[in-house]
Image (cartoon, rainbow, N blue to C red):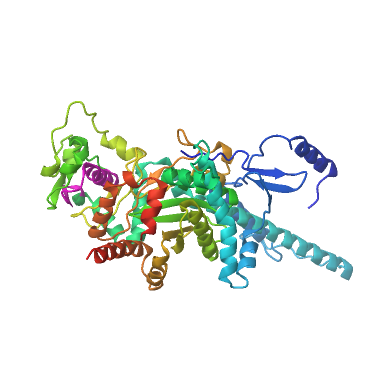
C-alpha cells in the first residue's frame, strides 16, 4: 500500500498537534453498506465476470465472427498475462465484496439485541423464539396460543402466594404473546400486604377476558380471593397495562394454552427478577457509531434495559422462578446476587 | 449508577506509537485469531488461565475503582476495601454494565448478564475468538468475577446459540456437576434448573 508522503506528513502533523488533547475518540469501523446494497453489487460482479469470460458469448447474442489473425509468440504471451491479471483483479474484487457482505450480515445478527435495548414488547415474538430455542415444544405452543380459538378465555393456575406482581407479569406476558389487551389482576387489584400474600397454597384461577370481551372493554378478573383487599383511595392506580407491556420486553414460557405460565421483564422500577442487561456501547460499535455518542439511559452512561427469561419447559420450575421474582429486592445488590449464585 | 465514560478510556498515542487503556500504557492490538492460536497451540490449560487472569482480573479492579469514586474511605483506609464495598453495594445492573464496558474496550464482544433464579449467567455476543475461544472467555470472566465478588468464583461455559455464548457462575463445588450434565447432552437451561434443585436438596438434607 502506498500513499503520498505529503498526505502522510499532513496526517502526522495533525496527530501531533492533537496529541495533548485530553481524549482520543474511539473510532469503530463503520459497516460499508447494508446487505441489501451489497448483494446486487455481488451479482453485478458475477454478471460482469460472465460477460467478460474468455470464449464466452452473451446469451442470445449472435455468433461472433471469427477472423484469423497472425500473432507472434510474444504477443500471445502478453495477452495471456493480461488475461490472468484481469482474472485475478476480478477475483480480488469479488473477495472484497464477499467480505463486505459478511460484515453487513454480522450487523444484521445483532438486530435482536437492538430490539431488546429498545424495550419494545412488540418484539415478544422474537423473545418467544428465544424460549422456543430453549424448550423446543414452546414454539408449537406459542402457535397454539396465537390461534383464534386459543385466545378465548385463558385460565392461569397460580398458587395463592403468587403476589400481584406475578399476576400482573403473567397477564402482561399473555397480552404480549397474544397481541390482545388483557387486563391483569394487578391493574384492577390493589397491592396487598405481604402477610396476606402468603395464602393457603391452593391454586387460584385467573380468568382473562376473551378477545371479544377485551375489545368491548370488559374486565373479568378473578384474583386469588385471599390476596385481594379493596384498593385504598390514596394509592395511585397501577399503570395502564398497555403502557406497561409496551415498555417491557417480554419473554414468555407458554407450556400450554390451558396452563399459561409466563413472566414479564422486571422493569426499571426495580422489581428485579432474572434480567439481561444490554449495554449500548457494543451495539453502537457494531452499528458504526462513536461509542461516546451511544444512546444512554437517564442518569447513567450505561443503560440497563432489562429482559427476563425463564429456563423451563415445565410449569413447576417456572413456579420456582416465579417465587424468586417475588423476592428480588433484597437480592438486587451485586454482592447479594453473587452470594446467592455462589451458593449453587 | 454506572460511571463508565468511554471518552478518553482508550488513547492512541501516535507520536510514541502507544495505546493506553484507562491511563495504563503498553496495550497491543493483536489479531484475535493469532492470539488464540498462540495461547492454545500448546494445548495447555495453564496458559489459557494465565492469559484469562491477566485480562480479567484488572477488569474487575478497574470496575471497582470506578464504582468506588465518591465512596467514603473505608474504615481501614485501604483502597481495596473501598473497592470491595463499592462493588458489593452497587446494583447488579451497574456492575454488569461496567464489566460490559470493559469487555467492549478490550474488543472481547458484547457482554450482558442474565439471572436465572439465583444463578448468574454471563452472556457474550460476538466474541472475536469465536466458539474456539469460549474457554478463554470463561477464564477472563472467572478472573473478573472473582475480583468483583472478592470471593472464589468459577465460570463454566454453558453453550452457544449462534454468536451468543453463555457462561454460568457457580461455586467450585458445582463445577464438575455442571460439566458432567452438559457432557450428557442436557440443555443448559435444564442444567441451571437442576442446580437449583440440587441446592434445595442439599439444604433440606443439611436441615434433617
Q: Position of residue B22 (x, y in %)?
A: 62, 44
The residue at 84%/41% (across/down) is A6
Q: Residue visible at 55% across and 51% down?
A: B59
**What residue is at 28 percent from the left and 51 percent from the top?**
A324
Q: Can see residue A243?
A: yes
- Apparent side of residue A186 relative to residue A74 in the rendered image (left or right): left
Query: Can residue A183 be seen at all in this image of the molecule?
Result: no
Q: Which residues are magenta?
A: A151-179
**Residue drawn at x 36%, y 51% as measured from the top left:** A127
The count of marks equals 0
Quarter the C terminus of chain A occupies = bottom left
Q: Position of residue A265 (x, y in %)?
A: 33, 45
* Quarter assignment of residue A228: top left
Q: Is residue A262 left or right of residue B188?
A: left
Q: Is residue A285 above or below residue B125?
A: above
Q: Residue furthest front?
A: B76
Q: Nearer the viewer, residue A240 or A153?
A: A240
- B193 to the left or right of A184: right
Res. A15 image quadrant: top right
- Judging depth in this view, the residue of A294 and B207 nearest the camera is B207
Q: Residue A166 lies in magenta, yes or no?
A: yes
Q: Is residue B29 above or below residue A77?
A: above
Q: Position of residue B54 (x, y in %)?
A: 60, 58
Identify the image quadrant of residue B206.
bottom left
A49 or A246, nearer to the observer:
A246
Amino acid at each position: 500500500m502506498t500513499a503520498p508522503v505529503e498526505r502522510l506528513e499532513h496526517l502526522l502533523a495533525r496527530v501531533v498537534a492533537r496529541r495533548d488533547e485530553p481524549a482520543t475518540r474511539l473510532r469503530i469501523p463503520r459497516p460499508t453498506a447494508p446487505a441489501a446494497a451489497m448483494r446486487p453489487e455481488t451479482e453485478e460482479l458475477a454478471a460482469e465476470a460472465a460477460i467478460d469470460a474468455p470464449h464466452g458469448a452473451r446469451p442470445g447474442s449472435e455468433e461472433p465472427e471469427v477472423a484469423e489473425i497472425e500473432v507472434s509468440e510474444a504477443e500471445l504471451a502478453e495477452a495471456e498475462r493480461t488475461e490472468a491479471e484481469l482474472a485475478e483483479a476480478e477475483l480480488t474484487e469479488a473477495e472484497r465484496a464477499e467480505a463486505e457482505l459478511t460484515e453487513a450480515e454480522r450487523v444484521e445478527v445483532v438486530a435482536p439485541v437492538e430490539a431488546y435495548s429498545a424495550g419494545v414488547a412488540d418484539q415478544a415474538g422474537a423473545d418467544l423464539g428465544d424460549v422456543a430455542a430453549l424448550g423446543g415444544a414452546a414454539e408449537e405452543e406459542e402457535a397454539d396460543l396465537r390461534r383464534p380459538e386459543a385466545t378465548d378465555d385463558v385460565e392461569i393456575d397460580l398458587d395463592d402466594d403468587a403476589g400481584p406482581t406475578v399476576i400482573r407479569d403473567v397477564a402482561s406476558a399473555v397480552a404480549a404473546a397474544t397481541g390482545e389487551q388483557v387486563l391483569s389482576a394487578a391493574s384492577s387489584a390493589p397491592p396487598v400486604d405481604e402477610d396476606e400474600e402468603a395464602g393457603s397454597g391452593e391454586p387460584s384461577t385467573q380468568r382473562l377476558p376473551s378477545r371479544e370481551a377485551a375489545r368491548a372493554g370488559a374486565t373479568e378478573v378473578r384474583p386469588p380471593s385471599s390476596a385481594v383487599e379493596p384498593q385504598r383511595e390514596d394509592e395511585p392506580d397501577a399503570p395502564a397495562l398497555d403502557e406497561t407491556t409496551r415498555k417491557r420486553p417480554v419473554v414468555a414460557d407458554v407450556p400450554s394454552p390451558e396452563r399459561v405460565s409466563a413472566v414479564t421483564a422486571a422493569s426499571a422500577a426495580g422489581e428485579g427478577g432474572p434480567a439481561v442487561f444490554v449495554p449500548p456501547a457494543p451495539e453502537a460499535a457494531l452499528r458504526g457509531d462513536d461509542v461516546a455518542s451511544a444512546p444512554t439511559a437517564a442518569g447513567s452512561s450505561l443503560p440497563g434495559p432489562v429482559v427476563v427469561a425463564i429456563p423451563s419447559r415445565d410449569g413447576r420450575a417456572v413456579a420456582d422462578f416465579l417465587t424468586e421474582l417475588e423476592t428480588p429486592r433484597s437480592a438486587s445488590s451485586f454482592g447479594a446476587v453473587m452470594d446467592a449464585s455462589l451458593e449453587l | 449508577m454506572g460511571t463508565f465514560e468511554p471518552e478518553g478510556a482508550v488513547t492512541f498515542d501516535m507520536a510514541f506509537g502507544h495505546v493506553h487503556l484507562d491511563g495504563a500504557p503498553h496495550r497491543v492490538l493483536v489479531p484475535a485469531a493469532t492470539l488464540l492460536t498462540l495461547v492454545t497451540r500448546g494445548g495447555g490449560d495453564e496458559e489459557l488461565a494465565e492469559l484469562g487472569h491477566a485480562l480479567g482480573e484488572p477488569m474487575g479492579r478497574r470496575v471497582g475503582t470506578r464504582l468506588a469514586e465518591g465512596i467514603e474511605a473505608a474504615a481501614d483506609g485501604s483502597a481495596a476495601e473501598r473497592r470491595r464495598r463499592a462493588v458489593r453495594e452497587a446494583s447488579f445492573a451497574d456492575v454488569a454494565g461496567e464489566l460490559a464496558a470493559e469487555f467492549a474496550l478490550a474488543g472481547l464482544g458484547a457482554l450482558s448478564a442474565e439471572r436465572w433464579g439465583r444463578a448468574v449467567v454471563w452472556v457474550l455476543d460476538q466474541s472475536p475468538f469465536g466458539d474456539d475461544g469460549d474457554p478463554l472467555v470463561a477464564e477472563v470472566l472467572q478472573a473478573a468475577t472473582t475480583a468483583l465478588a472478592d470471593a472464589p468464583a468459577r465460570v463454566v461455559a454453558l453453550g452457544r446459540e449462534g454468536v451468543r455464548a453463555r457462561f454460568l457462575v457457580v461455586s467450585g463445588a458445582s463445577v464438575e456437576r455442571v460439566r458432567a450434565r452438559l457432557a450428557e447432552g442436557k440443555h443448559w437451561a435444564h442444567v441451571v434448573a437442576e442446580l437449583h434443585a440440587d441446592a434445595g436438596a442439599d439444604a433440606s438434607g443439611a436441615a434433617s
